Amino acid sequence: MEEVFVSSTTRSPPPNCNKNGGRLLEICFAKQSGDAERWRVVLQKYRTRIYEVAKNYTADVVTLPSGEKVPKLFFQGRLAVPQREVFLAIRDCHASRSRHTKQQATFAAVSDIYCNITQKTVNTYIAMCPTCIRRPPVIKPLKGAASPIMSSAFRDRFQVDLVDMQKEAQEDVRGVTCSYIVVLKDHFTRLSYCEAIPRKQPIIVAEVLCRIFGLIGAPGSG
């Protein structure tokens, strides 16, 4: 949090001024002898709690249904949020206003309402946000080949893929349960050949390729 400046002078520096300032812990009422209720804020400065009258802030009060009066403090139209409510304020802006977007968007939404929440505090909250942690990371697309591989004739280039069908495995005519499909494709003619196999083993895939190459010819065999 930025330090909130509290002074008895008529002119007040910006909220991040260090002079005579401290971390805003809470906003409360304080009543002195013979005086009406006066606004006070509790600051933490040099590891001590000090009490100062907030004369340069606009004070307002919200009455809850229970009748309790909740004081609010404003600086130049924006709320000065107490330290214990900082993450709650960021959570509301992060979830509702920015919809779990990145740090800059959340900080912009927070800054529209609050005057004493820093970018560092917003970044700390987003790093611990359960929704953002569970979100899968963005994977950058890989660059393809610098130049495409061209095929100019039949059997110039074959492509072999294995399709995983373990969840829908079926038996062939010999009663063997097949869990994979070998797919061979010629890039020039688009000729494709498919055959089911029981397991993903090199010797089984090699046997299928030898059989099809024995029928149509091996790659690059002219």
Image: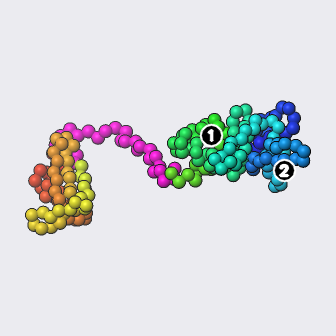
Q: Specify the amino acid type for callout 1.
A: Val
Q: Name which of mark 1 and mark 2 comes first in the sequence.
A: 2
Q: Where residue 105 sits in the image (x, y, percent)?
A: 57, 38
Kindly indicate the quadrant of the structure image that contains residue 18.
top right
142 left or right, relative to 196: right
Instruction: Please tell me how crowded label 2 is: few (under 14), some (14-19), or many (20+) other residues with Cα within 10 Å.
Output: some
Residue occupying image coordinates x 58% and y 53%: 128
Highlighted magenta segment, given as a residue range: 132-158
Q: Which residue is mark 2?
A: 50
Residue occupying image coordinates x 55% and y 39%: 97
209 left or right, relative to 97: left
Task: Quadrant for the C terminus, please.
Answer: top left
Q: Which residue is mark 1?
A: 110
47 left or right, relative to 123: right
220 lies above or below 108: below
Instruction: Give the label, 1 or 2, closer to the camera.
Output: 2
Residue occupying image coordinates x 22% and y 60%: 168
Badge 1 marks a residue whose secondary structure is helix
Q: Which residue is outermost to the bottom?
A: 175
- Closer to the camera in the image, 177 or 217: 177
Is residue 151 part of the magenta span, yes or no? yes
Q: Where residue 111 sits in the image (x, y, percent)?
A: 65, 37
Q: Where residue 199 sits in the image (x, y, percent)?
A: 23, 65
Cα–Cα span, label 1 and label 2: 27 Å
Q: Which residue is outermost to the right?
A: 34
